[in-house]
Amino acid sequence: MVDYELYGAIAALVFALIALILAIAAHKAAQSQANGARWVQAQMERIENEQNSIESALAGLGRHMDQWDQRLREMSQRIDALNARMEGIVAAEAGQAPGGFDHALRLSAQGRVSLDELVQDFGLTESEAQLLLRINQPKTTGQAS
């Protein structure tokens, strides 16, 4: 009978040892899974931060490109005005003075010439240049004519 009690105690001890090993393994698996979840969460946060940085950089790039577009338009207008002035000067030097007035009239109608340019480049008097600019001044709404 002593043998059966001893075998029972050994079996109980082995069973408890197996239960302990299984409990430790389950705990390690749960801990590993929790660590994996924390790692995935950290990676998601890092990716979200990088995405926010990229979006911010793209917005800044868009603003920068808008500024360059505006500068390009302004430069194009200035080049057009300079070309028009050069055409007027060349026409005036070639003795085509009557055509120069027509050219000055077109430029003032397009708003591409200043008072000084009309006087210097097209040989108009200051009052003639003022009259041309006033006639071709854009109409504003709500203003009596």
Image: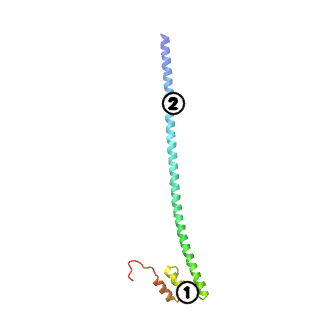
Q: Which one is in front, 35 or 80?
A: 80
Q: Secondary structure at mark 2?
A: helix
Amino acid type at image mark 1: Gly
Instruction: Using the image, determine if residue 77 lies above or below residue 119.
Output: above
Is residue 119 at least partly visible in the picture?
no
Label 2: few (<14), some (14–19) or many (≥20) C-alpha neighbours in 10 Å: few
Instruction: Using the image, determine if residue 80 lies above or below residue 15.
Output: below
Image coordinates for residue 8, horizontal then vertical, percent: 48, 16
- Among numbered discs 2 and 1, the one appearing first in the sequence: 2
Image coordinates for residue 85, horizontal then vertical, percent: 57, 81
Image coordinates for residue 47, horizontal then vertical, percent: 52, 49
Quarter where residue 90 is shown: bottom right
Is residue 67 at least partly visible in the picture?
yes
User: Disc 1 designates what residue?
Assistant: 99
Coloring basis for residues? rainbow
User: Disc 2 designates what residue?
Assistant: 25
Left or right: 138 in relation to 100? left
The residue at 53%/52% (across/down) is: 50
Image coordinates for residue 143, horizontal then vertical, percent: 39, 80
Q: Nearer the viewer, mark 2 or mark 1?
A: 1
Amino acid type at image mark 2: Ala
Label 1: few (<14), some (14–19) or many (≥20) C-alpha neighbours in 10 Å: some
